[in-house]
Image (tube, rainbow, N blue to C red):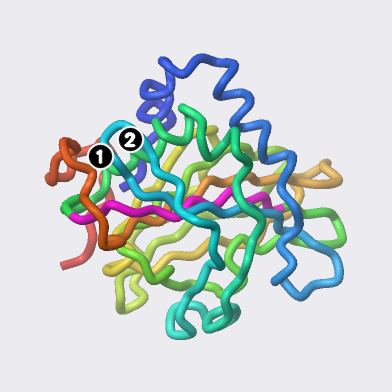
Amino acid sequence: MHFGPEVLGAALEGAGAGAVEEFTGSWDDLPADTHLGTGTPYRFRRYGLFRIRPGRLERLPHTAFFQDKSVNKVHGGVPRLFAPLSASVAGGEVLRTVVHTLRRHLPGPRAGMDTCGVHQIRVTATTRTEGHPAPEGVHQDGHCYVAQVLIRREGVSGAESALYDLRSRPVHRAVLTTPLETIVLDDRRLLHGVSPVRPAPGASCGVRDMLLVDFFPGGGDDARGEGDVALPVEGDVASPG
């Protein structure tokens, strides 16, 4: 499903503009992704793991992010240790609100979805070097659900998000342009990819900031009281049968 900024925007009204501004500003403090293997870094990121509890997030010990080679042909099979989320982001009301709101809008049953991985990612591009949000191409992440939230898009062309069914037939295409615009997908039933980031005409560089949240069962208690039925959202992108 693909929905506009009003969903997360309304949920974050109680957090206050200052808290939201501090949260989005934290993307300016992301270290380079050392696993890219490129001479000039174009991707910067932090990562954190959480158990989803009623009304809160329980931060789990920091660990490497791992994907099987079957879903990530570029970086799969290798534990990637990214810098942890800052304490203010991990323990803040904004992230808690965003995660719980996204969970309520998963495009399928929520029972058992008690754990999430949170990725802060910045991809940059210059006139000499384009940025690749998904170097692995069209892929799956190896989780149950994946939420993709635009935080910032400045001086950027490209970066079109595309969803495909498991036979690689196109299902949905969109360019996220407005902060808090979101795509949430069932990673078990869809493939996804993003085209390269390039500077917009007349710009010397471009910046695209994303918040990615992976939802999956972690073996703990479910987020009781959150319900187990997906909410209908305008602009729903149905998973293939």
Q: Quadrant of residue 41?
A: bottom right
Q: Amino acid at mark 1?
A: Arg
Residue occupied by mark 2: 101
Residue occupied by mark 1: 104
Q: Residues within 10 Å of mark 1 (few under 14, many from 20)?
A: some
SS for dot 1: helix
Q: Quadrant of residue 219?
A: bottom left
Q: Is residue 71 left or right of residue 204?
A: left
Q: Out of 160 and 192, give the one closest to the viewer.
A: 192
Image coords of residue 165 (percent x, y): 30, 70
- Magenta-highlighted residues: 112-123
- Residue in view at x 39 percent, y 40 percent: 57
The secondary structure that most of the magenta stretch takes on is strand
Q: Is residue 145 left or right of residue 80?
A: left
Is residue 139 part of the magenta span, yes or no? no
SS for dot 2: helix
Q: Out of 217 and 44, give the one closest to the viewer.
A: 217
Q: Amino acid at mark 2?
A: Thr
Vertical arrangement, residue 47 with respect to residue 187, above or below: above
Image coords of residue 228 (percent x, y): 13, 46
Vertical arrangement, residue 30 with respect to residue 134, above or below: above
Q: Is residue 176 left or right of residue 163?
A: right
Residue positioned most to the front: 61
Q: Are marks 2 and 1 in contact (CB under 8 Å)?
A: yes
- Residue in view at x 60 percent, y 46 percent: 85
